[in-house]
Amino acid sequence: MSKMHITLTVNGKQEELLAEPRELLIHVLRERLSITGPHIGCETSHCGACTVDMNGKSVKSCTVLAAQANGAEITTIEGLGTPDSLHVLQTMFREHHGLQCGFCTPGMITRAYRLLQENPDPSEEEIRYAMAGNLCRCTGYQNIVKAIMAAASELNAVKEAAQ
Amino acid sequence: MNDMTPPKDERAVALKGLGASRKRVEDVRFTQGKGNYVDDLKLPGMLFGDFVRSPYAHARIKSINSEKAKALPGVVAVLTAADLAPLNLHWMPTLAGDVQMVLADGKVLFQGQEVAFVVANDRYVAADAVELVEVEYEELPVVVDPFKAQAPDAPVLREDLAGKTSGAHGPRRHHNHIFTWEQGDRDATEKVLSSADVVAEEMVYYHRTHPCPLETCGCVASMDKVNGKLTVHGTFQAPHAVRTVASLISGIAEHNIRIISPDIGGGFGNKVGVYPGYICAIVASIVTGKPVKWIEDRMENLMATAFARDYWMKGRISATKDGRITGLSCHVTADHGAFDACADPTKFPAGFFNICTGSYDIPVAHLAVDGVYTNKAPGGVAYRCSFRVTEAAYFIERMIEVLAIKLGMDAAELRTKNFIRKDQFPYQSALGWEYDSGDYHTAWDKALKAVDYAGLRREQADRIADFKAGKTRKLLGIGLTHFTEIVGAGPVKNCDILGLGMFDSCEIRIHPTGSAIARLGTISQGQGHATTFAQILASEIGLPADDITVEEGDTDTAPYGLGTYGSRSTPVAGAATAMAGRKIRAKAQMIAAYLLEVHDDDVEWDIDRFVVKGAPERFKTMKEIAFAAYNQAIPGLEPGLEAVSYYDPPNMTYPFGAYICVMEIDVDTGEHKVRQFYALDDCGTRINPMIIEGQVHGGATEGYAIAMGQEIAYDEIGNVKTGTLMDFFLPTAWETPHYTTDFTVTPSPHHPIGAKGVGESPNVGSVPAFSNAVHDAFRAFGLTQSHMPHDHWRIWKVAHDLGLHG
């Protein structure tokens, strides 16, 4: 199968590679670029464990072809914070026990990151609706919702203080 | 105490020991995408395995032609049963004393069964090659109904068992019959039932479902031919047991096998069993000399690895006219699928289903379970429960409701009347268990009060009146449950898996600078062991939990243990942790006494130090003692400060709880809305309240899924109808109810710290609470029993059949 030349920006870093036309973005990230934060839970876009941010939108990278991502700007969980400077969502998920086995967590936080860009002050109902594309088998979501609300108010407080 | 010593409570808080809502140490890596799950592992030269699976539920295999697949560039090997047979690995033992085909040997017995294993240098190529393997099948008659499977002329499923009139659990009376397991006193029970004032009779079905952790099963097998060592990284809930089984069936010496469970993305019982993928990956690695990765996809996971439940439970319960229960009888038809691959302790072919007398003082009972083969996937694993406890709790909690209807009594009052009283513990149940401790009335009263039960019943009566008057189309259901679990398997005298006693273990090494590492025979799959076991230890040895590393899952380093399932980690390994900690403290006492120049008996423990009795200003902290253990020659003592404990529990533990669900049901659409869910758990001593609450939220959500929509369904020719997450219900944040948690504390009298385990309680307790709410909504209109899952269609059908659609 002839390969395609793909260029991506992943977590701020330019990447170039040759991929088969059928190759999925999640496999490019995990297998070729060793970015293993996004996980594979279903391969049918139901579970959201593979959620990454692509050109400012949440996508499920198990059903995006690498070819479709050509030229795209991609952010994964690895790009949201650093060990010395965590994203507030990362802090709040821990603070509010918003994770257990951790398998859904990278996709969950990455989705929540985009949600808070789209709606900086969501209600509980809005969070539950906007997070419905990401499945968690461990937490029952209650503490995930709590963590996202806490992150939102923290981010808003920081914003207000800056103004 | 000198002026520099912080007060006792401050020192205790600093340890973050028992009772602290300590933030989880695991989360630091998980929130940054730095978990280490098996599919994240990449070894040099690693190959990928993938299965050819049967499209049929029952068929003879006439031929397998893998030439085209082998010719595909990148394909390294294609294994079939014929390739495994010379190694005697084409069949494998199951955990239930049966055998199971690794690769189809002459026929297939369920849809999705493993037929051939393709190995290639890339996962895409492997998937292509799977399509190129040509298998010729001859279809055979299919049996998916466990009752029809027992008809005299039913098709013979297991030809390998021809002529075998007994199996691992006694006599077989039919070619599709696996075992009959009986407990209790049949004659005495029949006598009571035949002369009782009131007898309620019902068939209660707990449908087939699946644990479906978000991470599927998988492994990376790596045979190093130079040093003869086999290393397998995999999704194993019981790594040591896997090592022993792997050694027994492969012939590789056990010291040459290393099993590593890395981070596991949820287990819920799905990762207890040994699956053909593990065996094939190991064989492929031996054959090719390269590491081989096998990761199942979601459809394979739902179709082939480890279903749960599928119990048809026929019950009869008797009572006096005023509602005093006098006897219980239960006959279960257990659908085990094509191979009996239940993950139960060996002597318990129906697990601990004989806890089915529940929270009630029932003087006499009888239970018989018949295991049956059908053309469905093997399994029968404990989906977040301790070996069929979930089925048992659902059964008794439904029977209580059915009896309440028959008696015309309030179901809460009926429970109150029949609970085992606090003063009856330890309580000997009619089906053979000794309940360790409980205070059911206190928990129940607290729960009823918390939800204003009387008020809810008044509201419900008003609603029914409004409904009948045409003012509303919504009904209100109040789902009650009081469950008693049996967890922490278990005493070696009656609990083993494949002959391995179900003790567990902890080994502790204190470092000279006063930090420590503890290794256990269990393995966390999200429960937070690295956080909570350090807390147990912090309280025992007086070093801060933050200074204690907990490590599990590597059989080369961890002490032998039977793993994590059946809520056994805290009851068994948690006990081992406390006991090992006490050994450390005993030696520390001698060191402290030496350093303080007093007799051993003249010092006493004080949170994080030993102090001289009557002279509190003279003390040695654990940190000081740790250093002394490594730098001083103490007469009569070996250097170092380490301990190991293998803990054989004297009894199971019996957590309990009271759950109440309030549900609105739309009669015309069958839709429901959980208005309130109250969960009171009593898991004995509480180690980390934050984690307990998280476990309850998660387990109740699994219960919500099971009760309200989740099932593994087959059509009549054995096609799996729920093989993807499109059809198999996993609730999202949108549908999932909000939970209110509560607790009472009744410590286990035999556990070193009084803890009982909590991980599975919410699954066990919530399923009957949700289901009883649905039933209760329709009680006034004549509903006695309708089978789960209560999806919109089934609820609509209930309303329709009751004539509520006019």
Image (tube, coloured by chain):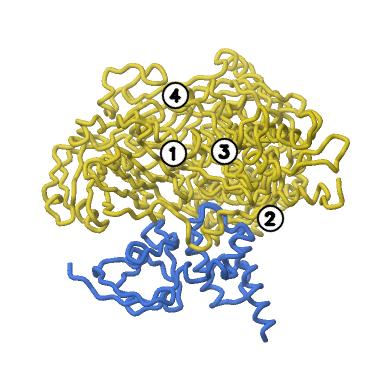
Colour blue belongs to chain: A
The answer to which of marks 3 and 2 sits earlier in the sequence is 2
Closer-to-camera residue (B172/A106): A106
- The residue wearing badge 2 is B466
Residue type of the residue flagged with mark 1: Asp
Residue at 63% x, 63% y: name it: A146
SS at circle 3: helix
How far apart in space, not on screen, are marks 1 and 2 (Cα)? 67 Å
Q: Position of residue B479 (x, y in %)?
A: 64, 45
The answer to which of marks 3 and 1 sits earlier in the sequence is 1
How far apart in space, not on screen, are marks 3 and 1 (Cα)? 20 Å
How far apart in space, not on screen, are marks 3 and 4 (Cα)? 19 Å
Residue type of the residue flagged with mark 3: Ser
Q: Are marks 3 and 2 on the same chain?
A: yes
The answer to which of marks 3 and 4 sits earlier in the sequence is 4
Circle on res. B569 = 3
Q: Position of residue B510 (x, y in %)?
A: 61, 42
Circle on res. B499 = 4
SS at circle 4: loop
Residue type of the residue flagged with mark 4: Gly
How far apart in space, not on screen, are marks 4 and 1 (Cα)? 21 Å
Colour yellow belongs to chain: B
- The residue wearing badge 1 is B556
